[in-house]
Image: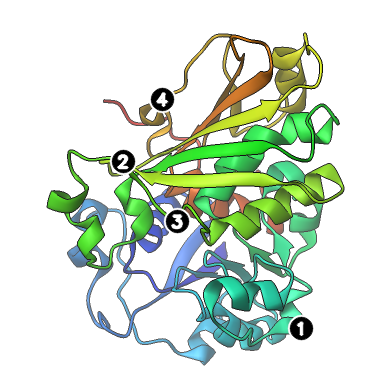
Amino acid sequence: MIKVGIVGGTGYTGAELLRLLAQHPDARVTVLTSRKEAGLRADALYPHLRGHCESVFEAPDAERLKGCDAVFFATPHGTAMTLAPDLLDAGVRVIDLSADFRLSDPAVFKQWYGLEHASPQWLERAVYGLPEVDRERIREARLVANPGCYPTAVQLGFLPLLEAGLAPRQGLVADCKSGVSGAGREAKLGSLYCEAGDSFKAYGVSGHRHWPEIAQGLGRIAGGPVAVSFVPHLVPMIRGIHATLYVPLAQPLDELQATFERRYADEPFVDVMPAGAHPETRSVRASNLCRIAVHRSADGAHAIVLSVIDNLVKGASGQAVQNMNLMFGLDERSGLLAPPLAP
């Protein structure tokens, strides 16, 4: 049984980790930390976990966490890079859900997050945790940088065409929408129901923190720099990301559908939908699935890829559990096979 620690278990991603691990056959949460909620049962904060989780929040203690086999950091940016090295040196495997280890260049990290990186030695050794791209390295990793939600949907959508050399390295457009839970559980004016409801808006148009992660990931897939425009939008729903991706086609490509079907034929959490389909965010709600459909524009000049995920599952905690499964030699589907919720 894998002994799991969760640092920062009071946010939405922490709650999702607790929900997913409650049904995991080979993992058990033994340490759950929160300074503010120390002494409170997790199911008192999250009543939906009653009968499924008996964990009690406790103040962070390095020695307690060192007794775990794996530790998830569901914390704000800047926490994991300070606390994780001590655990890694003790032999604990770490999956970080923040951005602390996603960007390989510490100067780029400082530019976008405003922080000097505290652990550049581990930044170089971290493995970016997108299983569909780097499954074998994840299996051997001691530290996994769990991808962001937008970057997961965008990279999985562009991947087959870039990998096969069928997409250019410039002129790519990612037009993306996210539910409000992507902003986290902290009280913020823009996340209030009266502010987000019955409205639709773009944000971070001139530069969003997920852009360098997307550009870095696509560059690794393509084998060279990729120019991509990324615009996120906030929509008045709780969960879900919908990425509409535009790929210029230099010449007609007759095998768009077949290219995607071949690439993802053996991927347990990527569903390539039939030609002409339009995946909906509700079709992946509470699941670790990414559903993809590919279309050709009316003038034939672009491939248009539709990619949907649940931002809290495949975009965060579900992918983190998938990575843990790989790191410990388990079936990567363990604890993640429940179908999506509907309605």
Which is nearer the N-term, disc 4 or disc 1? Answer: 1
* Local SS, label 4: loop
Residue receiving disc 4: 280
Which dot, 1 or 2, sits closer to the camera?
A: 2
Q: CA distance from mark 1 to mark 2?
A: 39 Å
Residue receiving disc 1: 121
**Do the numbered discs 4 and 1 sit on residues whose CB atoms are within 8 Å?**
no
Residue 115 picture location, percent across and down: 56, 83
Closest to the observer: 81 or 253?
A: 253
Residue 235 picture location, percent across and down: 31, 41
Residue at image position (27%, 83%) is 38
Residue at image position (51%, 13%) is 277
Considering every residue shown, the one lying at the far left of the view is 194
**Do the numbered discs 4 and 2 sit on residues whose CB atoms are within 8 Å?**
no
Q: CA distance from mark 4 to mark 2?
A: 14 Å
Res 243 seen here: yes
Question: Can you say which quadrant of the picture contains the C terminus?
Answer: top left
Q: Is 255 on the left-hand or right-hand side of 236?
A: right
**Do the numbered discs 3 and 1 sit on residues whose CB atoms are within 8 Å?**
no
Badge 1 crowding class, 10 Å Cα cut-off, few under 14, some 14 to 19, many 20 or more, is few
Residue at image position (39%, 44%) is 233
Q: As shown in the figure, which amino acid type bears the numbered disc 3?
A: Gly
Residue receiving disc 3: 204
Residue 143 picture location, percent across and down: 69, 69
Which is nearer the N-term, disc 4 or disc 2? Answer: 2
Among the 4 quarters of the image, the one containing residue 116: bottom right
Residue 183 picture location, percent across and down: 35, 58
Which is nearer the N-term, disc 1 or disc 2? Answer: 1
Among the 4 quarters of the image, the one containing residue 100: bottom right
Residue receiving disc 2: 235
Closest to the observer: 306 or 66?
A: 306
Which is nearer the N-term, disc 3 or disc 2? Answer: 3
